[in-house]
Structures are given as C-alpha cells and as structure tokens.
C-alpha cells in the first residue's frame, strides 16, 4: 500500500512541474508575438544604413527616395575606365524600374572616368522593388566597365547594394 502512495506523489510532482513550465513557455511566446506585432522586433529597423561595393569603387554618399535614386561613387581602380552600363534592381519579386536613366548617361558621361575621380549618378521616376517611403529599402546595382588601356573587349562587372531608409 505504501509503494502505490509514493508513486502517485511522484507523478503529481512531475505533472505540476511540467504544467508550471508549460504556462511560463506560453507567456514567453505571447510576449514575443506581441513585440513582433508592434514592430519592436523588426530586423530591418535595427539594421544600419549601408552602401557596399567591391574594392573597385568607393561609395561616398547615397539616397533612396520614393521616386528617385542617387549615388556618388569614386573610381578606386587606379587607372581611367569607361562605364558601359549601370543597372538597378530590387530585392523583392516586383521589379525596381526607373523611367529616366542615370545622369550623366552612360557611356557618354562616364567615359574616361579618371582614377580617384568622384561621379554622381541619379535616376528619376523609380518605382517597384518593394520600396516604400519611411521603410528600409534595398537597391542592387550592377555596374559594367572596362579600363581604358584594356578596351571594351575586356569588360568587367561589379555588383553593389544600398540599404537605406527611403525618404
């Protein structure tokens, strides 16, 4: 008789232990869900603004607007180069497009880009790509170029990205 009584006490203690931890786990899940619902745990708000390119270009300044995109780049190649194209895209499934091309328009404005020289490229009429004013937006940039000494037969490509709050 005594052994059956001790067995019931042990199982009751185990059940109370699991129930207490179950309620605590449920409270934690509700708190995390509430924080996520109100945007406190939104990782995009925690990420800093940044502009990343390869070592060929130094990103000096950038701006993502609701309908514009601007970027200032410095030629770090060490010799003059010609840019054949600059393409923009977004990270989302919706395409990021701009109605007017970069000013200065490649290749006329970006031929003979001297080493260490800074150029500002700007686009207008941009839309799509999940870019929303007041939120963080990411624009992906593909720049195709060749050095003046090697000629257009030896084109290279560098990819960059700009992550910033959309104004």
Image (tube, helix red, strand yellow):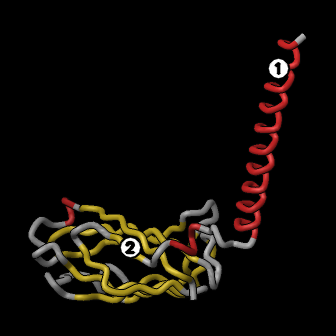
Disc number lying in front (2 or 1): 1
Q: Residue 42 versus residue 154: which sits nearer the camera?
A: 42
Give the quarter of the figure containing the N terminus: top right
Give the quarter of the figure containing the C terminus: bottom right
Q: Are marks 2 and 1 in contact (CB under 8 Å)?
A: no
What residue is shown at x 47% (from left), y 71% (from top)? 88
Packing grade of label 2 (10 A; few <14, some 14-19, many >=20) is some
Q: Label 1's element?
A: helix
Q: Look at mark 2 in the image and give the residue it sits on.
A: 86
What residue is shown at x 19% (from left), y 59% (from top)? 154
Q: Is residue 105 left or right of residue 164?
A: left
What residue is shown at x 27% (from left), y 66% (from top)? 54
Q: Is residue 15 left or right of residue 117?
A: right
**Which of the two labelled residues, at mark 2 and mark 1, occupies the earlier sequence position?**
1
Where residue 112 sits in the image (x, y, percent)? 18, 82
Report the residue that reaches farthest toward the front. Answer: 2
Packing grade of label 1 (10 A; few <14, some 14-19, many >=20) is few
Answer above or below: position of 89 versus 1.
Answer: below
Count all numbered tags in the image, as a single digit.
2
Q: CA distance from mark 2 to mark 1?
A: 78 Å
Where residue 41 sits in the image (x, y, percent)? 63, 67
Q: Is residue 75 visible?
A: yes
Where residue 122 sits in the image (x, y, percent)? 43, 87
Q: Label 2's element?
A: strand
Q: Residue 5 versus residue 78: which sits nearer the camera?
A: 5
Where residue 104 sits in the image (x, y, percent)? 36, 88
Q: Which quadrant of the structure image shows residue 56?
A: bottom left
Q: Residue 112 versus residue 73: which sits nearer the camera?
A: 73
Q: Which quadrant of the structure image shows residue 75?
A: bottom left
Q: Is residue 108 visible?
A: no
Label at residue 6? 1
């Amino acid at each position: 008789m005594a052994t059956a009584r001790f067995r019931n006490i042990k199982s009751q203690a185990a059940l109370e232990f699991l129930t207490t931890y179950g309620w605590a786990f449920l409270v934690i899940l509700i708190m995390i869900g509430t924080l996520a619902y109100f945007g406190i745990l939104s990782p995009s708000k925690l990420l800093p603004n940044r502009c990343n390119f390869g070592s060929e270009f130094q990103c000096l300044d950038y701006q993502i607007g609701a309908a514009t995109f601007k970027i200032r780049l410095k030629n770090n190649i060490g010799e003059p180069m010609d840019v054949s194209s600059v393409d923009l895209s977004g990270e989302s499934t919706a395409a990021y497009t701009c109605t007017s091309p970069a000013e200065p328009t490649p290749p006329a404005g970006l031929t003979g880009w001297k080493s260490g020289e800074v150029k500002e490229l700007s686009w207008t009429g941009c839309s799509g790509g999940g870019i929303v004013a007041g939120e963080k937006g990411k624009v992906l940039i593909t720049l195709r170029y060749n050095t003046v000494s090697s000629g257009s037969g030896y084109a290279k490509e560098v990819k960059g990205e700009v992550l910033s709050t959309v104004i």
